[in-house]
Image: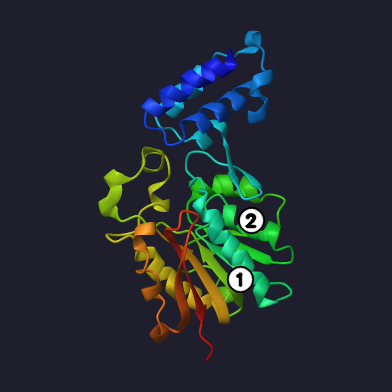
Amino acid sequence: MLLAEVAQATQRLADAGVPSPRNDAEELAAFVHGVKRGQLHTVKDADFDARYWEVIARREAREPLQHITGLAYFRYLELQVGPGVFVPRPETESVVGWAIDAVRAMDVVEPLIVDLCTGSGAIALALAQEVPRSRVHAVELSEDALKWTRKNVEGSRVDLRQGDALEAFQDLDGQVDLVISNPPYIPLTEWEYVAPEARDHDPDLALFSGEDGLDLIRGIERTAHRLLRPGGVVVIEHADTQGGQVPWIFTEERGWADAADHPDLNNRPRFATARKAMP
């Protein structure tokens, strides 16, 4: 019975325009029935929980899957998320993967890392987990987001602070090996084209940044230059439509070298990197 219900739910979600209807129908079935997705076939007909249709209706209305389950998965992490905090996206995983490789290539014993606009803490926690001797610092401005960040970083060695990314960590100026950020980068003019899950549920502070979407990235360029040691690296996510624009912010005249764009798993330009030039 449950698998038949899942098939029906899949169709409902597809009709509502949900991008991954079968995945979400199965995830919600597993969530409601307290099993893993691969165990759905073990749920007896008599154990079917009618609350399944309540959560399907919420997803049909384009409430994010992660808000319904309260969980988001990012690389090897399980994070608590909900209203007020940006839900981490799969494309950011490749940004973090590049950063991890870059830090390992530095051959620094205890690399110093700063995550600006940390949101749920996904990037900072992934780096702390996968670069075992790293010293990871993260900053978030929004009190609503920080309610979730604090839950996620509890028990970790991430130094979490509340504040403006552009003014943060002045105690670390000139010492940092890697600055990383997934900042807001959607142009205000694109509001109507944003998926309902993001537009109606992610905080505006985490999405939009000026007319061309690059306002905060321009500010982060200066902050990264202030924080990094010579030879240190900045990694910054951007929209796939901004490929080519972001590396031009990190110019030689402003003290940078090797500015470049990198593709995500779908081969779309997704993040830019640059190295602080040697004096």
Residue 102 numbered mark, or none: 1
Left or right of 65? Residue 192 is left
Quadrant (top left/top right/bottom left/bottom right) for the N terminus: top right
Is residue 36 positioned above or below 141 on the image? above
| Residue positioned 49% across, 18% down in the render | 53
Dot 1 or dot 2: first in sequence order is: 1
Residue 210 numbered mark, or none: none
Is residue 213 positioned above or below 9 on the image? below
Name which residue type carries label 1: Ala
Name which residue type carries label 2: Ala
Residue 126 numbered mark, or none: 2
Instruction: Examine the rendering and report whether any part of residue 267 can be seen.
Output: yes
Q: Position of residue 224 (x, y in %)?
A: 49, 73
Is residue 210 positioned above or below 23 on the image? below
Is residue 146 positioned above or below 4 on the image? below
| Residue positioned 63% across, 21% down in the render | 33
Q: Name the residue nearer the viewer: 5 or 124.
A: 5
